[in-house]
Image (cartoon, helix red, strand yellow):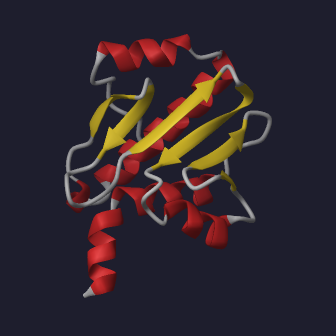
Amino acid sequence: MTTPAPAFQTDDVAAKFASYPATARQMLLIIRTWVFELASENADVGTLSESLKWGEPAWRPKSGVGTTIRADWKDKSPDCVKIFFDCKTDLIDRTRSLLSADLDCEGNRAIVLPLDRPLPEGAVKTALGWALCYHRDRKLRQA
């Protein structure tokens, strides 16, 4: 069972979520809940910092452990929400090669989630988990 996400950390983030159309807001709230849930299951991630980055809701794990995750809905792509990762990571390449049966990617920074389909929970959580521990795991692989 999914644990509810904590209250929004800033009024700006709460206002951003309130501004979304209902279907997009619901999907983004689920993604937000999963991010907090995954972070709480891994002590290395630490307390997430929630803010707006480039006007998009963003969650940053403890420095040196993971990379920032952003998620947003935009007027110019009204039929989907997107999860964004730092383009300097290999997260989208990894997602494309290992999770392409369940997730569509755009360029080297976004997972595209159509609003008219159920969220592929396992695949999305896998990608989010990779991001939350990206730097820690990369150091372990290089050791």
How many numbered marks does the figure carry?
0
Location of residue 51 with respect to 117 vertically, above or below: above
Q: Residue at x 65, y 72 (%)?
A: 97
Whole-percent x, y for residue 3 in the image: 41, 41
Q: Is residue 113 left or right of residue 48?
A: right
Q: Is residue 1 visible?
A: no
Q: Residue at x 25, y 60 (%)?
A: 65
Location of residue 91 with respect to 28 vertically, above or below: below
Q: Is residue 140 left or right of residue 53?
A: left
Residue 139 lies in quadrant:
bottom left
Quarter of the image with the C terminus is bottom left
Q: Residue at x 39, y 35 (%)?
A: 58
Q: Residue at x 35, y 15 (%)?
A: 12
Q: Is residue 103 left or right of residue 116?
A: left
Location of residue 22 with respect to 132 vertically, above or below: above
Q: Quick one: which residue is furthest to the bottom in this view?
A: 143
Q: Is residue 119 visible?
A: yes
Whole-percent x, y for residue 136 in the image: 27, 69
Location of residue 29 with respect to 75 vertically, above or below: below
Residue 119 lies in quadrant:
top right
Q: Quick one: which residue is furthest to the right in this view?
A: 116
Whole-percent x, y for residue 34 in the image: 46, 45
Whole-percent x, y for residue 131 in the image: 41, 57
Q: Is residue 103 left or right of residue 33?
A: right
